[in-house]
Image: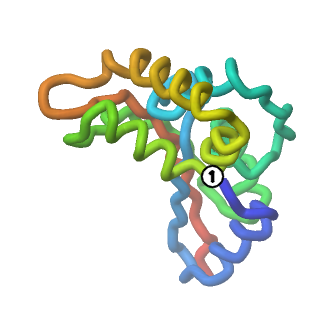
């Protein structure tokens, strides 16, 4: 997701593999099926204007569109390219407060946006986020649904 030149990166992966080897890439599916990320983003976007991202911006959801990464892996020279989705829970024994801390620590974009705000605005965003994610917190911690794409290809054998 974060390679500046994904085809070049994929070609290099294939180059260093043994003939007949397989490469697998795991990337996030769409934001709409990954509320661990989207809830915070949706709330923050209401408070801080969002710049329009380029279609190929180096973001976590760069390859969320079905077929996008598979096509690039094929262009890089892989054969037998496959793609499938995997649903899984994102679970941790943390509180809603700890979730806020986790999300602010793991996202540089989120931190930069929050830094442009006054403390009252940050407190308002935190309150709304915590209220919106509350349904994902049960006894003992959080459980968010998550979905990723697994894209796999082979290097031709010699």
Residue drawn 37% across and 28% down? 145
Residues 18 and 4: in front is 4
Category of crowding for the residue at label 1, using alpha-carbon neighbours closer than 10 angstroms: few (below 14), some (14–19), many (at least 20): few
For this view, does 82 lie left or right of residue 130?
right
Say above or below: 127 vs 19: above
The residue where tag 1 is placed is 108
Q: Quadrant of residue 19?
A: bottom right
- Figure coloring: rainbow
Res 65 seen here: yes
x and y percentages locating residue 30 in the rendered image = 59, 30
Q: Quadrant of residue 56?
A: top right
Say above or below: 106 vs 148.
Answer: below
Question: Viewer-proximal residue, 106 or 22?
Answer: 106
Q: Is residue 150 above or below residue 118?
A: below
Residue ID at (59%, 21%): 43
Single out the residue that lies furthest toward the left: 139
Quadrant holding the N terminus: bottom right
Q: Position of residue 69 (x, y in %)?
A: 68, 48
- Residue shown at 41%/44% (left/top)? 101
Q: Find residue 81 and report its horizontal and vertical position in percent.
A: 61, 51
> Can you give x and y, in whole percent of width and height, for residue 124 in the image?
54, 21
Task: Residue 70: tell me if it is visible.
Answer: no
User: 110 or 92, which lies in front?
Assistant: 110
């Amino acid at each position: 997701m974060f390679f500046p030149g994904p085809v070049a990166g994929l070609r290099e992966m294939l180059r260093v593999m043994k003939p007949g080897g397989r490469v697998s890439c795991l990337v996030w599916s769409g934001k709409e099926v990954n509320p661990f990320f989207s809830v915070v983003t949706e709330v923050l976007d209401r408070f801080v204007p969002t710049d329009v991202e380029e279609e190929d911006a180096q973001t976590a959801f760069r390859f969320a569109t079905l077929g996008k990464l598979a096509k690039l892996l094929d262009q890089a020279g892989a054969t037998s390219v496959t793609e499938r989705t995997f649903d899984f829970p994102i679970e941790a024994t943390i509180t809603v407060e700890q979730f806020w801390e986790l999300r602010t620590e793991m996202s540089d974009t989120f931190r930069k946006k929050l830094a442009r705000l006054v403390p009252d605005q940050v407190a308002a965003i935190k309150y709304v986020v915590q209220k919106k994610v509350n349904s994902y917190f049960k006894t003992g911690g959080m459980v968010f649904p998550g979905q990723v794409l697994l894209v796999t290809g082979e290097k031709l054998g010699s």
